[in-house]
Structures are given as C-alpha cells and as structure tokens.
C-alpha cells in the first residue's frame, strides 16, 4: 500500500511540475518519474506477480521520456513494446464466453472505426504506419484485458480502457482537432491506468 501511495504522490506532482522553478527540460522529464517508480515497485514483486508488467512499465517509462523529448515515433515504439508485454501477461488467462464476446464486439465497433478515422487525418506516411501498427497493438491489449479469467479481471479491463482512452485523446488532439485541457485528460487517465496495473501486480499472491 505504501508503494501505491508513493506512485499517486509522484503522479500528482507531475501536474505541478510546470510551476516549479527548475530547468524546463528537467520539469518536463518528470512525466517519466511515476512510471519509473512503478517499474521498480513491481520489479521487487516479480516472484509473485511475474515480469511482464514490470517490463511493460519499464517500456512505458522509456516512452514517457521519448515523449517529453518530442520524439513521437520513439514514443509510439516504446509504448507498442509496453503493450506487447501487457498482452503477454494477459493472454494466458484469456477465456471466451458469450458475454465476453458481446463485450468484445462492442469494443471493436468503437475502437477500430475510431482508429480508421484518425488515420485518414495523418498526412505523414511514417506516422501513418506507426499509428496504424500501434493502434492494432493497443487494440489487442484491450482485447486480451477484456477476456481474462483471473482475479480482479474487471480492474484490468478498466485500466486497459483508461489507457486506450488516453492514447485516443493523444491521437485525436495531434491529428484531428485540438482538445481543450488535453494534457489533463491524457495524463490523468494514463496515470490512473498505469497505477491500476501497478497496484494489481503488487497485490498478486501468485502470477494469477
């Protein structure tokens, strides 16, 4: 519980970083500190929680750093790796049921058309390919999160949806239309998602 509170405090401090009297780059790089902390916290719990979530958080930390430096393609690449690790953690616990099939159908009918819509607004071919590949990967992460048959599966699904919402805001804000208070929407849902994944990992009694 102490580690979870530590993550919450570090994430909250991100929103005050812009008001700190420090070098602009240092303040901007603070975005990676909460996920780095979550990486270290979950890595200490690997014997019971496994390595995939700590590795996902580590890749996310690199993605946060790249984003802070304005390296969009590297940011997308690192987060794609993060989602692959999340998928690796979720996939062994996946199980289809009739109810989950309905949920997946609804999820797909929302996410995939949105991804296609955003891609029609991307003029740069490199970014178009990167976003397309990333979109399928994060869609797969959400897909596997929704059909897990494990303890607290609903919270994994909530975390995945928060992550997808955050990235959807990034994509829409960057390629389609400016979103008022975009950073607040993006970062609160992003940290909530990572915080949930971190907490779920820390409370595992075994890799379940």
Image (cartoon, helix red, strand yellow):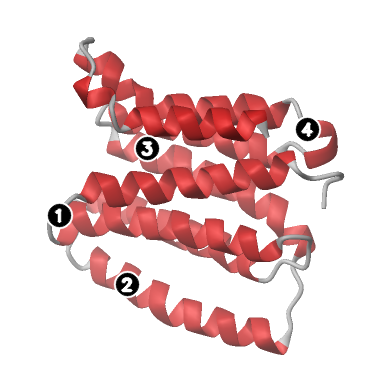
Q: In which quarter of the image is residue 191?
A: top left
Q: In this view, does 100 lie above or below 9?
A: below
* Nearer mark to the viewer, of 2 and 4: 4
- Sequence-wise first label, 4 or 3: 4
Mark pair 2, 3: CA separation: 21 Å
Mark pair 4, 1: CA separation: 39 Å
Secondary structure of the residue carrying numbered label 3: helix
Secondary structure of the residue carrying numbered label 4: helix
Mark pair 4, 3: CA separation: 25 Å
* Nearer mark to the viewer, of 4 and 3: 4
What residue sits right under mark 3 in the picture?
Answer: 75
Q: Quadrant of residue 148?
A: bottom right
* Nearer mark to the viewer, of 4 and 1: 1
Q: Residue at x 43, y 59 (%)?
A: 164
* Nearer mark to the viewer, of 2 and 1: 1
Q: Is 208 placed left or right of 80 in the picture?
A: right
The image shows residue 135 at horizontal and vertical percentages of 41, 60
- Sequence-wise first label, 2 or 4: 4
- Sequence-wise first label, 2 or 3: 3
Mark 1 neighbour density, 10 Å: few (under 14) some (14–19) many (20 or more): few
What residue sits right under mark 2 in the picture?
Answer: 114
* Nearer mark to the viewer, of 1 and 3: 1
Residue 180, label in figure:
1
Mark pair 2, 4: CA separation: 36 Å
The image shows residue 9 at horizontal and vertical percentages of 47, 29
Q: Is 146 placed left or right of 188 in the picture?
A: right
What residue sits right under mark 4 in the picture?
Answer: 46
Secondary structure of the residue carrying numbered label 2: helix
Instruction: Specify whether residue 126 is in view.
Output: no
Instruction: Specify whether residue 39 is in view.
Output: yes
Secondary structure of the residue carrying numbered label 1: loop
- Sequence-wise first label, 2 or 1: 2
């Amino acid at each position: 519980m102490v580690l979870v509170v530590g993550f919450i405090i570090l994430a909250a401090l991100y929103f005050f970083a812009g008001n700190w009297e420090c070098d602009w780059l240092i303040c901007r790089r603070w975005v990676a500190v909460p996920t780095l902390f979550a990486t270290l916290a979950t890595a200490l719990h690997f014997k019971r929680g496994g390595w995939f979530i700590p590795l996902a958080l580590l890749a996310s930390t690199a993605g946060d750093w790249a984003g802070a430096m304005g390296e969009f393609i590297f940011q997308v690449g690192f987060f794609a790796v993060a989602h692959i690790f999340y998928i690796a953690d979720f996939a062994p616990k996946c199980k289809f049921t009739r109810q989950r099939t309905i949920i997946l159908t609804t999820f797909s009918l929302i996410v995939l058309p949105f991804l296609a819509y955003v891609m029609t607004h991307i003029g740069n071919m490199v970014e178009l390919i990167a976003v397309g590949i990333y979109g399928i990967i994060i869609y797969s992460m959400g897909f596997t999160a929704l059909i897990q048959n494990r303890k607290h599966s609903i919270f994994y699904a909530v975390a995945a949806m928060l992550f997808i919402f955050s990235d959807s805001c990034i994509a829409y804000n960057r390629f389609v239309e400016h979103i008022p208070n975009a950073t607040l929407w993006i970062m609160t849902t992003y940290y909530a998602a990572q915080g949930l994944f971190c907490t779920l990992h820390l409370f595992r009694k075994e890799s379940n």
